[in-house]
Amino acid sequence: MPTFDLYTKEPEEPVRQVPASGAARFAWEYDDGRDRLLALYQKGKDKQWDGQKRIDWELEVDPFDPLGTPDEAMSLYGTRHWAKLTEKDKGDLRRHYASWQFSQFLRGEQGAMICAARIVESVPDLDAKFYSATQTMDEARHAEIYGRFLHEKVGMLYPINDNLQSLLDDTLRDARWDMPYLGMQVLIEGLALAAFGMIRDTTDKPLPKQILAYVMQDEARHVAFGRMALRDYYRQLTDAELREREEFVIEGCYLMRDRLRGVEVLENFGIPKAEAEEYSEQSEFLTLFRKLLFSRIVPCVKDIGLWGERLQQAYVDMGVLEMGDAGLDLLMSQDEEIAEKLDAERFAAEERERVAEVRGAIDAGR
């Protein structure tokens, strides 16, 4: 079925064009490179996987509860509209919320693929070009997987959110080679990792848990790559140049915070936009959700050397400043361990099935 037949609202442009500027850079030094970045590149090669084979697409998904979303997580819960909803209405609402979330994940992954390709083109160092080439493949795989989940299991897509589109456009239009790192690796990927993790750790549905765990295993490397490259580069910048990057981070964080409302979902259920925004702001669950989404961004921004007074004040206003002390390396290692544990469990189950088949064949031959 064509994708456009599944949209809740047809996108304004079938293909969006973003004018981009900046130089393509060739590097002629092929022996020298940063050991940690080259080691990450090797890991990126070793950890490539096939989304068609690693994920068990035979697992059933209820399109009206794809993620096991609790009532409290929906912003209409506790409002005057909630009591009027039938069980079918609540199932439709869960389907729309899951579609909206994974549709934005899909857009972010396509944006990450394009940004990683831009980094290959524009970054001056060959070791960074090597790693970005592996990331481009990773992001293509992620977009493929999210697209398949939405097509085959949910059967519904939402257009890209305006604020996410705005941040992607700003990231791609900037001619400075470090901006795709900052916009994508730090802001969009950092926020996505936190969102992925919250769903991965709370859903009781096997297929989305698999998808998110395996995607997060890759994303942990991508954020590490952005941290390494930007930390090295930002040590060389002037205070004025650092402040420019901080202003970009501040604006991007406000955009990302404001995109995480799901207002489009409520509008599809006949709730006026202003009322939908009010419900989203008042929802205790969504307030906590939005705050936790910065658990990956704030410590990363601090780590790469962007920690000026104005940026810190913005994080105070958002109520997330204390997250600057979060253990980012521990979170990333846990992401990898969770994916490896899923693999081990799946391989053990397959081994048990093979042993049972062999034993059955032996018994039948006796």
Image: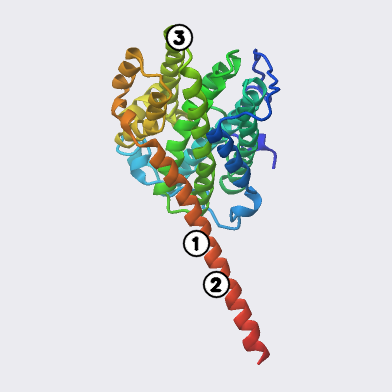
Kindly identify the residue that appears in the image at 49 percent across and 33 percent down.
223
Q: Secondary structure at mark 1?
A: helix
- Name the residue type under label 1: Glu
Q: Check the image and report above or below for 313 versus 221.
A: above
In the rendered structure, find residue 62 and report the number of the disc placed on it: none
Residue 53, horizontal then vertical, whole percent: 64, 54
Instruction: Read off the residue under disc 1.
Output: 345
The local crowd at label 3, few if under 14, some if 14 to 19, many if 20 or more residues have their Cα within 10 Å, is: few
The image quarter containing residue 155 is top right
Q: Is residue 213 left or right of residue 306?
A: right
Give the answer, above or below, for where 270 lies relative to 16.
Answer: below
Looking at the rendered image, the disc whose residue lies closer to the viewer, 3 or 2, is 3
Residue 118 coordinates in the image, percent (x, y): 64, 23
In front: label 1 or label 3 = 3
Number of the label disc, if any, that sits on residue 238: 3
Between the residue at mark 1 and the residue at mark 3, the CA separation in whole angstroms equals 50 Å
Residue flagged by tag 3: what amino acid is it? Thr
Screen quadrant of the N terminus: top right
Amino acid type, residue under disc 2 in the picture: Arg
**One can see residue 72 in this view:** yes
Q: Answer with mark 3 or mark 2, whichever residue precedes in sequence.
A: 3
User: Residue at the spot x=48%, y=15% of the render?
Assistant: 236
Q: Answer with left or right where residue 24 lies relative to residue 221.
A: right
Q: Secondary structure at mark 2?
A: helix
Q: Which residue in the protein does label 2 denote?
A: 352
- Residue sitting at 55 percent across and 63 percent down? 347
Q: Which mark sits nearer the N-terminus, 1 or 3?
A: 3
Front residue of 143 and 315: 315
The answer to whether one can see residue 9 in this image is: no
Circle nearer the N terminus (2, 1): 1
